[in-house]
Image (cartoon, rainbow, N blue to C red):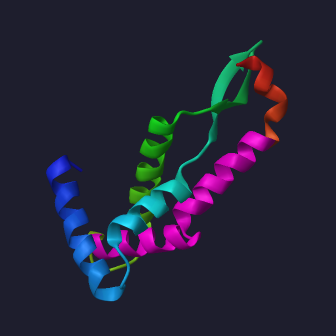
Amino acid sequence: MDKLTLTRQFGIQFGIFLGRQKTNPLSVLRQAIRGVTPDIAVKARRVGGSTHQVPIEIGSTQGKALAIRWLLGASRKRPGRNMAFKLSSELVDAAKGSGDAIRKKEETHRMAEANRAFAHFR
């Protein structure tokens, strides 16, 4: 999805959102991205012939990029009329603390916690 299409989708999505909610769409977007942004992730590292999932800390820029990617992926999987409607629904769910993008973040954190023993391979 190119930048122009993404900008148009966010504009349409804000229009849909304003019709349904009485809150500021930008604050909901910020809250959704903040809620989905991961602090830690796992990276495959090959050590001694076997591959381990090593937990690594990720920076804020990379975390926000992952969060936006997860939000867009989760909204694409949703059933619905069009992308703007699906994206607005996913953002509202993420701001409330539910939805597929939040589940993806929790799954990533669980995986990092389970593989904490391999943290010294960094």
Q: Nearer the viewer, residue 96 or 90?
A: 96
Q: Residue 69, how many percent across, how many down?
A: 42, 50
Look at the magenta stretch and give its main secondary structure: helix
Query: Can you say whether 61 is above or below 104 in the image?
Result: above
- The quarter of the image holding the C terminus is top right
Range shown magenta:
84-113
The question of residue 98 being in magenta is answered with yes
Q: Nearer the viewer, residue 50 or 31?
A: 31
Q: Nearer the viewer, residue 14 or 76?
A: 14
Q: Nearer the viewer, residue 53 or 18?
A: 18
Query: Can you say whether 119 is above or below 95 in the image?
Result: above
**Residue displayed at 36% across by 85% down:** 22
**Residue displayed at 64% across by 39% down:** 40
Q: Residue 74, how many percent across, how many down?
A: 45, 62
Q: Residue 65, how many percent across, how many down?
A: 42, 43
Question: Relative to 74, is 112 on the left or the right?
Answer: right
Q: Residue 13, how many percent across, how many down?
A: 27, 72
